[in-house]
């Protein structure tokens, strides 16, 4: 056998041995980092910070990334941190994202590391708690960063670690979150090819992974409607213009937008009123009624149609009864769409971590996520990590945002591994 044929015949064997050694290498690193992830999470959980105020958390993250030898940028979108790990070989840039902010929730769990932090939120003294699991996201991504930094000589590409503030929303009067990080140019500067993110959930057990291709989480937008009429005595409604009666008709009319004017066979949508306020006395028809609500849907074209039809409906119903309506739509998060091709590509990776039995194809979620902004710029994949202990019915577990929300620590090694495997497998397949 000549030398060239011999080297060709040995190539698959050597490649397999190389991949096996690589797998053993990162498996060892994952095992080493597991206790650190738990320790980091407990520390962050005990010291939660609200959106755009994650100063301590950001400092902890930045110190860790710098110690790993990365290029680190801080102060993005107030407290955001980006770490750039450059592999030894050419290849794509993979973005991994974790959100850092907590919620104005008073913790009711009896944990040795429970939060006792408090703050004044919108004029009310409240507790602060990682009631959505962002503390776990930060810790798991810090763990993945350590594993991947330990493999930089084998990495065929770069890894962009994004630790993001204010996913739950910025303080009133401020911008924040993914949208502001993009506005401040992180994608232009670091140019990722793909974005991955995960979210821990009590709705799945440890060992389960929820995924969905295409539209996965809804857009979330707020609307405000001010109906202005003419105040008059309740005994003579014809002497004025009744904004309460007009508001009631607007509620009915708006509820017909989704049921009668939007093609919901394409994607579902929801329009809900959350507050109606107007008047001070039983026999006085007021001058003004104010209404607020939320819009959720899974298609960006439908979203634009709902905005237009809601404004048209409110204005014309008010006008028909001698009132006027001012409609303000505050755009929130777009639809979170998992790129179908990327989802299909990474399913074997997820099965490797969770097994086929642990893979759960999720229904659409009417909650929202600002990871959606990243996924509008590059192909994205956002998945759900089970956090309820095995043997416990997830339907009975406290939901995310509950003061009793808790994540089982045995799930962290799976989340850390998933982020690591996403990176390694995507780079390997991009060759």
Image: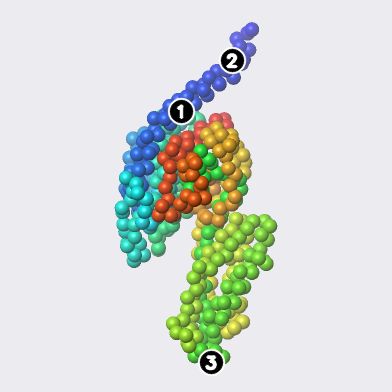
Is 138 placed left or right of 305 in the picture? left
At horizontal 60% and vertical 9% (from top left) the residue drawn is 3
The picture places residue 173, in percent across and down from the top left corner, at 40, 63
At horizontal 58% and vertical 42% (from top left) the residue drawn is 360
At horizontal 55% and vertical 63% (from top left) the residue drawn is 295
Please tell me which residue lies in front, 207 or 285.
Answer: 207
Q: Which residue is mark 2?
A: 10
Residue reaching furthest top?
1
Density class for disc 2 (Cα within 10 Å; few <14, some 14-19, many ≥20) is few
Q: Which residue is mark 1?
A: 27
The picture places residue 246, in percent across and down from the top left corner, at 57, 79
Q: Which residue is mark 3?
A: 236
CA distance for labels 2 and 1: 25 Å
The picture places residue 99, in percent across and down from the top left corner, at 43, 48
Is 157 placed left or right of 75 in the picture? right
CA distance for labels 1 and 3: 79 Å
Above or below, 339 against 50 in this view is above
Please tell me which residue lies in front, 279 or 3.
Answer: 279
Q: Are marks 3 and 2 in contact (CB under 8 Å)?
A: no
């Amino acid at each position: 056998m000549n030398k060239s044929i011999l080297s060709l015949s040995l190539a698959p064997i050597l490649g397999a041995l190389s991949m096996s050694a690589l797998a053993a290498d990162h498996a060892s690193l994952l095992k080493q980092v597991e206790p650190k992830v738990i320790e980091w999470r407990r520390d962050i959980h005990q010291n939660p910070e609200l959106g755009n105020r994650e100063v301590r958390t950001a400092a902890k993250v930045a110190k860790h990334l710098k110690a790993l030898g990365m290029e680190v940028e801080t102060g993005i979108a107030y407290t955001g941190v980006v770490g750039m790990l450059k592999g030894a070989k050419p290849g794509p840039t993979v973005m991994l994202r974790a959100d850092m902010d907590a919620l104005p929730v008073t913790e009711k769990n009896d944990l040795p590391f429970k939060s006792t932090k408090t703050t004044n939120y919108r004029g009310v003294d409240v507790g602060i708690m990682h009631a959505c699991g962002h503390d776990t996201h930060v810790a798991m991504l810090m763990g993945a960063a350590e594993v991947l930094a330990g493999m930089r000589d084998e990495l065929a590409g770069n890894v962009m670690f994004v630790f993001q503030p204010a996913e739950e929303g910025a303080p009133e009067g401020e911008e924040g979150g993914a949208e502001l990080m993009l506005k401040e140019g992180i994608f232009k500067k670091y140019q990722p090819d793909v974005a991955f993110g995960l979210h821990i959930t009590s709705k799945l057990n440890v060992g389960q992974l929820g995924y969905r291709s295409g539209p996965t989480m809804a857009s979330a937008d707020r609307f405000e409607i001010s109906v202005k009429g003419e105040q008059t005595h309740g005994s003579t409604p014809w002497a004025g213009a009744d904004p309460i009666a007009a508001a009631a008709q607007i509620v009915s009319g708006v509820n017909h937008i989704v049921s009668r004017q939007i093609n919901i066979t394409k994607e579902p949508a929801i329009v809900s009123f959350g507050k109606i306020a107007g008047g001070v006395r039983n026999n006085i028809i007021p001058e003004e009624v104010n209404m607020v609500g939320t819009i959720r849907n899974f298609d960006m074209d439908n979203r634009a149609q709902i905005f237009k039809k809601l404004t048209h409906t409110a204005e014309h119903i008010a006008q028909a009864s001698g009132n006027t309506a001012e409609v303000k739509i505050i755009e929130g998060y777009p639809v979170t769409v998992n790129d179908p091709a990327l989802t299909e590509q990474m399913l074997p990776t997820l099965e490797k971590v969770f097994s086929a039995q642990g893979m759960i194809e999720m229904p659409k979620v009417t909650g929202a996520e600002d990871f959606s902004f990243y996924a509008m710029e590059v192909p994205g994949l956002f998945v759900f990590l089970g956090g309820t202990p095995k043997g416990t019915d997830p339907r009975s577990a406290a939901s995310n945002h509950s003061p009793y929300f808790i994540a089982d620590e045995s799930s962290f090694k799976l989340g850390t591994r998933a982020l690591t495997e996403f990176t390694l497998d995507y780079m390997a397949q991009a060759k």
